[in-house]
Image: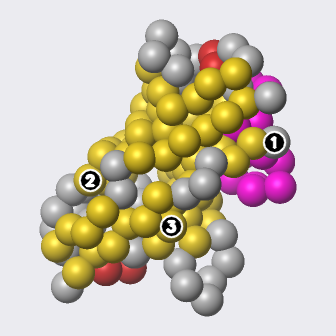
Amino acid sequence: QVQLVESGGGLVQAGGSLRLACAASGRTFSRYAMGWFRQAPGKEREFVAGISWSGGSTYYADSVKGRFTISRDNAKNTMYLQMNSLEPEDTAVYYCAARSTVVASSRAYEYNYWGQGTQVTVSS
């Protein structure tokens, strides 16, 4: 079992920045590929970014490329999402997820564990 807890969400003006964190406990964090997903009201959950177990490979949705950066610190059992140049369209609940394999995936159903989510609201 892996327990995931997100933090760092909040209210920010368009053009601003936020840094989300996902703290993991339980089994060896470095054995899991990780991902960030988000879900806006009335919309399906969508992939935002993913990172391999070592942090050597990262993946991004086209909508966030160049603005968001995913990273992880396996010594601290924590994954991060640095979000810059935020837009009102980025408003959503952001979830971190873990899958027990090396490579991340953009498909939500391939993740075994999920956090409870953290709200990000970007005002125009």
Q: Is residue 104 magenta?
A: yes
**Label 2 to label 1: alpha-carbon separation:** 26 Å
Q: Residue at x 58, y 29 (%)?
A: 24
Q: Residues within 10 Å of mark 3 (few under 14, many from 20)?
A: some
Q: Which disc is residue 36 wearing?
A: none
Judging by the rendered image, the residue that carries numbered circle 1 is 112
Magenta stretch contains residue 60: no
| Residues at marks 3 and 1, CA–CA distance in whole angstroms | 19 Å
Rendering quarter of residue 119: bottom left
- Tell me where residue 18 appears, x and y as whole percent: 26, 53
The residue carrying mark 3 is: 93
Q: Secondary structure at mark 2?
A: strand
At mark 1, the secondary structure is loop
As drawn, 67 above or below 73: below
Q: Amino acid at mark 2?
A: Leu
Residue at x 30% of width, y 46% of height: 19
Q: Mark 2 near mark 1, Cβ–Cβ under 8 Å? A: no
Q: CA distance from mark 3 to mark 2?
A: 13 Å
Residues tagged 3 and 1 counted as in contact (Cβ below 8 A): no
* Label 2 sits on residue: 18
Q: Earlier in the sequence, mark 2 or mark 1?
A: 2
Image mark count? 3
- Asked if 102 appears above or below 93 in the picture, the reply is above
Q: Which residues are magenta?
A: 98-111
Horizontal side, residue 124 vs residue 49: left or right: left
